[in-house]
Image (spheres, rainbow, N blue to C red):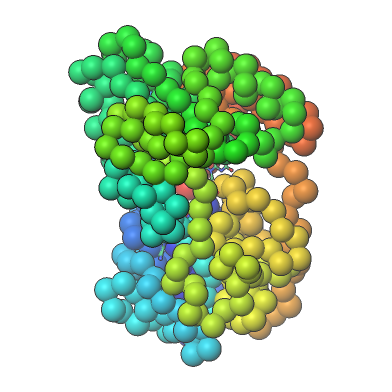
Amino acid sequence: MKHLVLLGAGHAHVHVLEGLAAHKPRDVRVTLIAPVDAQLYSGMVPGFVAGHYTLDECVISLKRLIETSGVQFIEGSAASIKADIQMLTLSDGQVIDYDVLSLNTGASIDFEKIEAVMPGARKQAMFVRPMPVFVKLWPQALALAASRPLHLAVVGAGAAGLELAMAAAHQLRGPAYPPGSRITLVTGSLAPAQSYPPSVQRRVLRTLEHLEITVVQESCVAVNEGELVLGSCAKLPCDVPLLAIGVQAPAWLANSGLALDEKGFLAVDHFQQSTSHALVFAVGDVASRADSPHSRSGVYAVRAGPPLLRNLLAGIGSQALTPYAPPARTLNLLSCGSRYAIAAWGPFSVEGGWVWRLKDRIDRQFVQRYSV
Ligand SMILES: Cc1cc2nc3c(=O)[nH]c(=O)nc-3n(C[C@H](O)[C@H](O)[C@H](O)COP(=O)(O)OP(=O)(O)OC[C@H]3O[C@@H](n4cnc5c(N)ncnc54)[C@H](O)[C@@H]3O)c2cc1C
């Protein structure tokens, strides 16, 4: 029996599990290692913050897929990999050997690195990631907002920061909360939505204005109790600082022996195979395509699932691998707090209630497909 180890239950691995449930080769033993047998679907988290979804609606339960695929589930997290001897160690000390290893663990937050550039953040701020922690803390912020108006400041104006600021504005201005809560978006040196084309930037700015979200184009350099310190030394009073400022590579990759990119993410080729170790595959935010770099987003992680399944089965059976080209552009759907969204496809964009309904349908179908 060959041993295939799936590390992390990210977007692509749920598809691999579905594929194995339909057909698992008899001579392959598969182990899934993840902190829980469920996956919080990030695309719906802003909708949870806005009050459109319950937390349960945003979670893909993997129980059924694990059962039907005959995969062994180990509840745990990888703490180190020794790729040269095909072995990984979990944080509880368990050692696991593999014939083929597939990583879909997402990216990490390096709290020490953030604390170095933003002293006080670790103690005073709420972080969007890890998302399972954030979704447990958010109801506490809402409970506070129910007792008095809050000033919430979102630091970071990428897709996640924008969606969360708009979602929070929608929720806190609702009938369950006293009037007067304020939302500020601290964007760093760039204007909001800089990674989007100009037409989307204009739509985002209009929406932020409509939602009365104050945009501060400055960096946050420290977080004190009750305030953010900005690059200009100005202080922004704030009850709830929410950090949505990008991701880092998992620290446990550093001494793995695997080839990494300049930021420490696992370097993979057109087969989504490690550029240094043929028995290791990686997809999603943990990986960097050396041949065809693309942004880190759930859409790319989802699309990587079917070719990953094919190549894992081929790899473990010593058959030829199939190259995979990530899409040159993807449909980006940005929810705007209320049941309204902006769609971006390359330079083109549209917005409306129907865009939100489309996003809602796609997201719910994704969660239901793998849970039910
Ligand atoms: C608020 C928010 C909204 C977003 N909305 C969108 C959106 O609408 N569309 C979009 O395309 N992208 C969106 N993103 C980005 C998206 O969340 C990520 O790009 C995506 O989750 C990456 O998917 P992944 O499969 O690589 O990993 P993840 O979804 O991060 O999954 C990784 C899994 O691996 C597990 N894991 C982690 N470490 C270990 C370990 N050491 N050992 C074992 N298991 C481990 C985790 O618990 C998790 O289950 C959003 C991000 C945020 C923060």
Rendered view: 319 above or below 359: below
Rendered view: 157 above or below 85: above
Please name the residue shown 63% across and 36% down the image.
190
The foreground one among 196 and 234 is 234
Please name the residue shown 47% across and 65% down the image.
250
Residue 44 in the image, given as x and y percentages of width and height: 47, 35
Please name the residue shown 34% across and 74% down the image.
90
The foreground one among 79 and 217 is 217
Tell me if 293 is positioned left or right of 146 in this view.
Answer: right
Residue 20 in the image, given as x and y percentages of width and height: 52, 64
Rendered view: 54 above or below 149: below
Please name the residue shown 60% across and 31% down the image.
192
Residue 235 in the image, given as x and y percentages of width and height: 39, 31
Rendered view: 315 above or below 221: below
Kindly tell me whether residue 355 is visible in this rendering: no
The foreground one among 277 and 122 is 122
The foreground one among 236 and 138 is 236
Query: Hey, which quadrant is residue 352 in on the image?
Result: top right
Kindly tell me whether residue 243 is visible in this rendering: yes
Residue 26 in the image, given as x and y percentages of width and height: 51, 77
Query: Hey, which quadrant is residue 116 in on the image?
Result: bottom left
How many marks on residues? 0
Query: Hey, which quadrant is residue 283 in on the image?
Result: bottom right
